[in-house]
Image: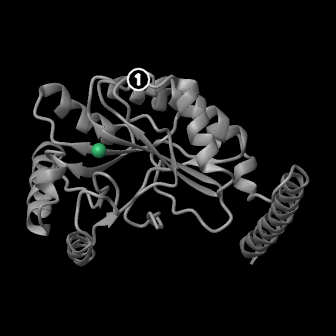
Amino acid sequence: MFIRSIRLKNLILVAGAALLGLALGIGVLFLGAKAAQSGGEPSPPESALPPESQGSQQTMGTDVPEDGEKVVYLTFDDGPSVVTGEILDVLKEKGVPATFFVIGATTERGKVLYQRILDEGHALGIHSYSHRYQEIYESADAYLADFDRLANHLESIVGVKPNIFRFPGGSKNKFAAPEVLEEIKKEMEKRGCVWFDWNALAKDDKSKATPAQEMFDNVVSSAGDQEKILILLHDDALRTTAAECVSMLIDHYQGLGYRFEALTAETNPIHLK
Ligand SMILES: [Zn+2]
């Protein structure tokens, strides 16, 4: 009886403390939301947290954002390349996840980079094995053959087949007939593979490197004040300014209360209209 009453007392104390904690928590959330509102547009309490507390290595890129959350997705097409390492270094330093839509690399460096992308908490997506528009967009079968070749290649190196991809040139492009694109999309839906376009871009696909500041300005002006910003960047030998631009973009958007996520098949896709 004595022991039981002590336990009961403890239980009441614990329950009381829990209620107090809950009340304090709600108060903090309320104040946080108020503070965010007074600073301009309303934003969720999470975005008021300092960047370091927004996810450990384990949770990087795994959260599905809710409505009203401000999220940036950094995506890189055409890697791995000689600049991938620099981009990964910046992402690691800042603790930010990203997504790499890759091509078929057969060099040792390329294979190591596929693995490093995954090991460091980023998403690996399919772009194209050959990236030759004329060949892959000749027919849906040609596209799927190239897609499967890369999927198998990646599986043999990193052990998984990605289920996210980006069409070379985007999901509406002038290289493929609309009916070919439709056929590919139907097949991909059947397979549970999700494609992503973009709603902001660095315009960095020129024949020489674009200055980092110019890339940054292009992203910021094309992104506007969208809540979910999916940025198209390139990762190839000519993009020697990509890493510098990435660093600038992370600082800028974290300062505005955005968090960074890697894409998954569960992310709401952004498609070109
Ligand atoms: Zn590409």
Residue 268 screen position, x and y as percent: 48, 67
**In the depicted view, which residue is nearer to us: 52 or 170?**
170
Residue 67's place in the image compared with 216, above or below, is below
Residue 10 screen position, x and y as percent: 77, 66
Q: Indicate left or right for 20 with 233 as reference.
A: right
Location of residue 140 (image quadrant): bottom left
Q: Amino acid at mark 1?
A: Ala
Location of residue 28 (image quadrant): bottom right
> What is the count of numbered marks?
1
Residue 157 screen position, x and y as percent: 13, 42
Residue 267's place in the image compared with 136, above or below, is below
Residue identified by numbered label 1: 209
**In the depicted view, which residue is nearer to us: 192 or 75?**
75
Quadrant of the frame with the N terminus: bottom right
Residue at (26, 34) in percent of width and height? 80
Ligand 1 lies in quarter: top left
What element does badge 1 sit on? loop
Which color scheme does this rendered protein use? one colour
Residue 70's place in the image compared with 202, above or below, is below
Q: Indicate left or right for 243 with 190 as reference.
A: right
Residue 172's place in the image compared with 95, above or below, is below
Residue at (39, 21) in percent of width and height? 240
Q: Indicate left or right for 57 with 128 as reference.
A: right
